[in-house]
Structures are given as C-alpha cells and as structure tokens.
Amino acid sequence: MKKLPILFILMFSMVLSAQEYSFSGNFTSLSQYYVDDKKTGDFIEGDRFRSNNYLKLNSEINKFTFGLQIEGYAPQAILNYSSSFDKQIGVATYFANYKNKKLDITAGYFYEQFGNGLIFRSWEDQQLGLNNALRGGKIKYKPFKYLQLIGLYGKHRVGFDVSEGEVYGFDTEFSISEALKIEKSTLNFGFSIVNRSQKIENADEGFNKNTYAYSGRFNYSKNNFYSNAEYVIKDKDALLEFDNVNTNSLSKGSALLYNIGSSYQQLGWNATFRRLENMTYYSDREVNDNIDNEQLVNYLPSLTKQHDYSLANIYVYQTQSGVTFSPFEKAGEIGYQFDVFYQFKKKSFIGGKHGTNLAINYASLYGLDAEFNHNNRTFNTDFLSFGRKYFTDFNIQMRKKWSKQWSSIFTYINLFYNKKYLEERSGKVNAQIAILDATYHFLPTKSFRFEAQHLWTDDDRKNWLAGTAEFNLSSKFSLFANDSYNYGNEINKIHYFTFGGSYTKNSTRLSLNYGRQRGGLICIGGVCRIVTESTGFALNLNTSF
C-alpha cells in the first residue's frame, strides 16, 4: 500500500503530458506562533511555531479524474490537533475516478454520505482538523434516472495511515415521483446498510467483530411544504469504559430524525425532532470520543442553532449520543428544534422602507430517561423518554436595513447549559445574551461594521462583555479588532482580544492576526474540537488555481 502514492503521482504525470486535460488545485496554510502570556499562561509545549499545510491537486482527462492531497505539519501540527499528524510532510490522500452517465467508480481515498449521515458520512474540515476519508473503493450506479445504487469499502484515514477497522456500506435511493413522472410533488425513498468490522484481542467467546447499522428514510415535498424522516437500527456493540472494550457488555442502538416545514408568502417554519440511543460509531471501538474527531463512521451534529458571535459560543452544545455508566449515567439524547421566519413587508409599520426579517429559534435537548444496571452493565429506555435536561436555547434575531448605508442585526439569546452532564463538571448555567451588529456602507466596496455583546449570568464565570470593529477599506483589504472581557469573574478577569487584517486578490487570501484564544470548544456546523487557552500570532493563506 505504501507504493500507491507513488503510483498516483506517476498517473498525474501521465495526465499532465496529455494534450487535452484540465488541471486545478488549492493550497491552504494555517500557521501559528505561540508566546508567553501572564493571563493565559506560558507556552510549555515544544515548538512555538507550528504550521498545517494542504496542497490539493486535481486533473481531468476525458471521463477520468485524478487527485491527491499533500499535507505538511512543520515542525508540528497546530496546538490541539490530533497527535496522528506526526509526519512532517507526505501524500495524505489520493484517488482515481471514472464517471459516465450511469457509472461512477472511485479508487483510493473518497468522501460520501448516506441519507442524513446518521449511519455514514466521510468528510473533511481543515479548521477542525477533521478528515474521515475512507481508503478503498466506491461504485455508484444509476441504471435509471429514478434509481441510484452505491457500494463502498474502505478504512478510515488516521493521520498518514489508516485504521484497523473496516467499513462496508450499501445505499440505494429510489424516486417514485421520477419513476411515475409526477411533476407537482417529490417522493423519494432510501435504504442504507453499513458494517464496521474490527477484531478485538482477548474478546469474549462468541463476540461478533461486525457491527451492522440499517437505515430507512423518505423525503416528500409539494409546493412549499416538505417533510422527511430517517430511522436507524444499530446492532449490539461493545461498551468502552476506562479505555477498555468490554465485549461482555453489548447494547443495541437506534436513531430517529424527523423534519417538517413549509413557507407561505412572508412566513416560513421548520421543526426537527431527533432521538439518539447508543449511536457512537467508530471504525476503531477504542476511539470512543470526540476529542480528535477521527474514525467517525456517522455524522451527528448538534441539534441547535449555529451562532456566529463569540459570547454565544461560550456555552455550546455538543451531541451526547453514547453510553456511559460512570461518573454519570447517559444512554443518549432526545430533543427538538423549532424555527420561525417572518419577513415584514416594505413600507409596513415594522418593515419600514427597506423591509425587516425576523427569525425565532428554540432548541431543547435532554438525556434519555433510562434505568441502569451497573453490575451487568446494561440499561433500558422507553422510546419517548425525556430524562435530565441538558440544554435549551431560545433566540430571536431581527435583521433590519434602515437606509442604503445602514443595516443592523439584533439578537437575543436565553440559554440553559447543564455542565454536570455536558462537561462532567458540577454546575448549571442560566444565561442571557444580547447582541447588536451594525454595518455602515460608505461606498459599494467600503464599509464599517461593529458588534456589541453582553452575557449575563450568576453562574460559572459570571458576566461577559464583547465588542468587534471591522473596517473594509476595499474589496481586497480589511482590518478588525475584537475583545471578549470576562469582567464578572472574581478570580481572573481577562480580556480575550484579537486584532489583525486580511488581503484578498483574485483567488488568493492572506490574513494575519495576534491575540488570545479562549479555551473550550470551537464548533463548525455543529461539530466541535477542544482547544486550550493560548496567545500568539496566526498567519493563514489560501489560494486556488
């Protein structure tokens, strides 16, 4: 397998020597230099300068596509990225693809998603240090417009290597509306099956190395109404406790996701319900956590609104899909989210001259109400069992354009955060957050934006105050400064400040900043990674060609 990257490089050379081909690429560099700081502490790790670099190359010739990604981590990966990125530079992923109207075949590393991702999704996010590509093969076959079949096999990427566990998958999507040529509505059905196969040393007699998950789903839409659902059954899986796989303790898993919504004139709404029971699913059972986001078979983002503002992301929810007996009993989560959108008409009392948009969101997540048998390491739940409250978030946001130059966004958030079960630390947090975001446009390419944020709470680290100023000098150059001040903290009042700027020309963007990183979770799309407090410079470069 070590010779495969060389083979793909040779294939690249052959393609580049061809007379007719298309070539594209992208380079991203994320670099940081850490300094000592009395408030955030001295930097005691090795290598103050660290850099993550990604060079992606793709080439197409006729119906074939070849690609590879070279990555470099010199002298080490950025702080809090996975320790598996221990190789300074190398070919990280590579693939060859053939595609025509009915057939799509990929060999090498690939990404894919079945349905909503409840049983399978492989994807990449460089900001999170997440890359769950599979190395193996994938075949998509579409014999008719209304039918698609996918079969795949692979091993998860882990740094510059792959996992021991194997992943097999099959997915089919059938469009009834396409088959019957129904034009006024859409009705699709899908079925998926995924198997994680991993041998466990010293496993109990009769232990099955295979763990299957089965998923059925539908999607229906007509006019401005839509509804979709997916249900998953997961075979018995071993319990991981204290970094040991207990093959004598086996429990099934399940998941249910249901969405419904519609829009009519100025009003739109959406409701989502989700229940997860024992749905952690890794290609390596011994990696049963979300610290490094590696070897995840499925995709379970948090069922909450993804906020854009700093204080709104201090108490951020992370999906609780697994089973633990100690220190706290947890079997999964159950919860729901509602969204309502309303656009006030122009020239109405609230809409004014330019109109007003209002968005209301409410999310509430609970643990499953379960009975635990600590001696046998088993548990029982009722299907619609709401247990301890983990998290709630009620927020309302109003977007208003006052004139051709002025626009603003006002946000109010009321949240509850159960630290005991979400962080396994004692305490609960009730907080309110108010945010004002205003932008003034001098010219089409020049603007000034400022934010003012405040978080009120009598719990945890008490009150926060934050502000941001951003000046866009042109479409190419911008400057910013922000600060989050934990003034209510009686033990350690601290400013988490950052200032810097960015320059963009064509498809190249360069940014430089200096500041403090607040410790906690950084989340993108409902998936998070843990970061520690630090201070330093950051230089980021992204260019495509």
Image: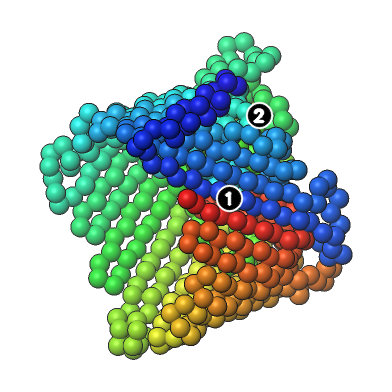
Q: Secondary structure at mark 2?
A: loop
Q: Give the quarter of the image for residue 455.
A: bottom right
Estimate the x, y position of residue 166 in percent, counting from the top left. 53, 23
Observer-nearest residue: 67 or 430? 67
Q: Which residue appears at 54% of the width and 76% of the height?
A: 472
Going by the image, does 224 lie left or right of 237?
left
The image quadrant that residue 538 belongs to is bottom right
Residue closest to the eye, 218 or 409: 409
- Regarding residue 379, the answer to whether it shows in the image is no
User: Alpha-carbon distance for marks 1 and 2?
Assistant: 32 Å
Q: Secondary structure at mark 1?
A: strand
Name the residue tied to disc 2.
286
Residue drawn at x 63%, y 60% is: 315
Depicted 197 relative to depicted 325: above or below? above
Amino acid carrying label 2: it is Glu
Q: Nearer the viewer, mark 1 or mark 2?
A: 1
> Which residue lies at the image location 47% right of the left edge and 35% below the top edge?
67
In the rendered view, does 335 fall on the left or right side of 458? left
Say few, some or many: other residues with alpha carbon within 10 Å of mark 2 (under 14 / 14 to 19 / 20 or more): some
Residue depicted at x 66% and y 47%? 52
Q: Is 68 situated above or below 360?
A: above
Q: Is 223 or 353 nearer to us in this picture?
A: 353
- Tell me whether circle 1 and circle 2 mark residues in contact (CB < 8 Å): no
CA neighbours of label 1 inside 10 A, class few (<14), some (14 to 19), many (20+): many
Identify residue for label 1.
28
User: In screen coordinates, is 364 left or right of 44?
Assistant: left
Sequence-first disc among 1 and 2:
1
Q: Position of residue 336 (x, y in %)?
A: 45, 54
**Residue 247 place in picture, x, y as percent:** 63, 21
Seen in the picture, residue 329 relative to 193 is either above or below; the reply is below
- Considering depth in this image, is 301 or 155 the residue closer to the camera? 155
Locate residue 308, reporting x and y percent: 54, 65
